[in-house]
Image: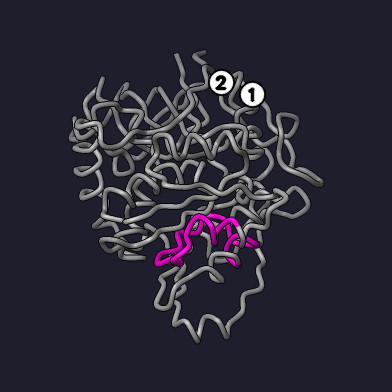
Amino acid sequence: MATHREIRLRTRPAHGLPSSEHLELVTTALPVPAPGEVLVRNRWFAVQAALRTLISGRIEGAPLPSVEPGDTLFGAAVGEVVSAPPGGPRPGELVFHWQGWREYAAVPASACTPLGDALPDPVAHLSQGRTAYAALTRGAEVRPGDTVLVTGGAGAVGTMAGQIARLLGAGRVVGTTGSPAKAERLVAGLGYDAAVVRDTVEPLAAQLDGAAPDGIDVIFDNVGGEQLRAAVDAARPGARAVLVGALSGQLDPAGTGATARVELDSYALVLKRIALRGFSPLDHPEADAEWRERFGGWLRTGEIVFPHVRVAGMERAAGALHEVMTGRHLGAVVVELS
């Protein structure tokens, strides 16, 4: 019997973040595609912090299902078509789909997106730049000369958001991150003019005053919590805040990953006429083709890079998830399968 391997949730953590002990690498029968499905051999898949929330259980209104004990994890993947129904992708063609965390997947043909030659590197299709681009162009509507603050600037979304904000005409781009080493890398080559480091002796508000002395026009918030509060305090009148993530709660070892509470001064929001908007790229499918075209062009001219770390093999995938959740890496993390 032909087999393959996949990563399953063994048990939910009683407390703290998921780690390798909560996952298991299972050898199981190769999936048999049903009518209308494509058999895909995965080549790369993304390791995303959002899995912490899905592992915690169902959240009302979430666009993705929870991961239950015994379930195979899932996420963005790029794979090679092995077989397909008539009219579907061609064998040998690379496709994007959402059944990562396994070596082979049976995917509905309608859920496979052929990659073509839009991007020079197929792994770049696992970038979260689409989220950043849609939020900056549709949510915050970045204008030439804006001062943009990106919280969580060293993550998979943030490392793209800083570069995109710069390419869209921002006059100054500031990021927050968790270490001086990451701050240096943000400024050295990822579009940031300055980066402030959380959890240091100097309060975040004071650091933002120095990094953005004229105030902030656009808040691109991946984090929530204290960082969102400090950003609102530093905002200029008429600032636009677009909320795309909630890492302060999602990755809190003391929490469940399902809530991210913050206390904001609503009077300041009123007086400064700050627009605060929750954002999902799912509401803007028209941005997808636009993003791929611009991303491909920027990659080819060297105006943008896709910061990521490649982890080799299914054996290291479970550990890579914990590393993402604890902030070990800068940029995206991708598991590469031989």
Left or right: residue 98 compared with residue 16: left
The tag earlier along the polypeptide, 2 or 1, is: 1
Amino acid type assigned to the residue bearing label 2 in the image = Met
Q: Nearer the viewer, residue 279 or 161?
A: 161
Query: Of the numbered discs in the image, which one, if any, rests on residue 314?
Result: 2
Query: Which residue is situated farthest in the right direction here?
Result: 14
Quarter of the image where the C terminus is located: top left
**x, y percentage for residue 184?**
51, 36
Residue at 64 percent across and 62 percent down: it is 225
Q: Position of residue 131 (x, y in %)?
A: 38, 51
Q: CA distance from mark 2 to mark 1?
A: 8 Å
Residue 208 lies in what quarter of the image? bottom right
Residue nearer the viewer, 201 or 217: 201
- What stretch of residues is rendered in magenta? 207-229
* Element carrying mark 1: strand
Query: Decide: marks 2, 1 in contact (CB < 8 A)?
Result: yes
Image-quadrant location for residue 106 = top left
Front: mark 2 or 1: 2
**Looking at the picture, which amino acid does disc 1 mark?**
Leu
Crowd class of label 2 (few under 14; some 14 to 19; many from 20; radius 10 Å) = many
Q: Is residue 307 magenta?
A: no
Judged from the image, the secondary structure of the residue bearing numbered disc 2 is helix
Disc number placed over residue 25 in the picture, else none: 1
* Label 1 neighbour load within 10 Å: few <14, some 14-19, many 20+: many
Residue 217 in picture, x, y percent from top left: 40, 67
The image's colouring method is one colour
